[in-house]
Image (cartoon, rainbow, N blue to C red):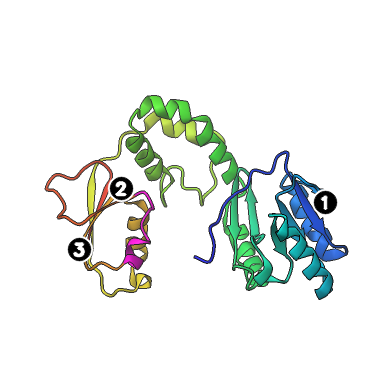
Amino acid sequence: MNGLPILLRTAGRRVILVGEGEPADAKRRLLERSGLTVVADDAHARIAVVAVEDDAEARTAIDGLKARGILVNAVDRPADCDFTLPAIVDRSPILIAISTGGVSAGLAAAIRQRLEAILPAGVGRLAEGLGAARAALRIRFPDGGDRRRAIGAAIAAGGPLDPMVPHADDAVARWLDGVAAVAGRVAVIRLRSADPDDLTLREARWLGQADRIHHAPHVPAAILDRARADAVRIMEPVPAEPLPGLTIDLA
């Protein structure tokens, strides 16, 4: 990865914006939409956006801000950016950020437009419904692993809460009425090459959903990186009796 994607809590924070004209106005609209207060300067600000076309003026502003320990985004100057402002798909509370590391804003925008077209407008309400159901889910599934697996099965492709299809506002409540613990199962993946792009869509989906991965020592890190970050990696054979959730036998 060329950076670590993070979401900054913006409520009550200030951001310095240097520049005028349409590039600066566009950044101002985005910053204010996120809840930031845009200022010309502030001793307590920790981030800044420089939208200045003149090279010498931009250099002075960037160097001055960085000397104060402020993280800077410099429009059309990726080498000077401490952080980038990605293209955003807004389905609040769901936000999807698309970044090219400052290489091509146009490409990020094109991908955003594709995602806008396929992501249901009401998926934010689905997220809110799951958030409101936290207490009920904890009662139904006291074990965190059981709870995560039940939600994972519900939101998987074709599941009762598949986020890529529209749902009624009471979809989560109706799902809770009949949800049961997910039984343990084992999926076998036999690699055809060391290239993760050679994984089938089903295999990639399994890795993304796995609770644990039993793998041979020679399995490349690039393949294991396709799995969930919190999936347990085990260099031992799969036990005869599968544990709860999804176990991958990878070699």
Q: CA distance from mark 3 to mark 2?
A: 17 Å
Q: How many marks?
A: 3
Region rendered in magenta:
221-230
Q: Is residue 10 visible?
A: yes
Kind of residue at badge 1: Asp
| Sequence-first disc among 1 and 2 | 1
Q: Residue at x 16, y 55 (%)?
A: 236
- 3 and 2 marks in contact (CB < 8 Å): no
Closer-to-camera residue (128/167): 128
Residue 14 location, x and y as percent? Answer: 76, 45
The earlier-in-sequence mark between 3 and 2 is 2
Q: What residue sits right under mark 3 in the picture?
A: 216
Residue 211: give its label: 2
Tell me residue 177's x, y (percent): 41, 28
Q: Report the amino acid beneath label 3.
A: Ala
Mark 1: few/some/many CA within 10 Å (<14, 14-19, 20+):
some
Q: Is residue 166 magenta?
A: no
Residue projecting furthest to the left: 240
> Residue 189, percent across and down?
24, 63
Q: Is residue 224 magenta?
A: yes
Q: Which residue is mark 1?
A: 41
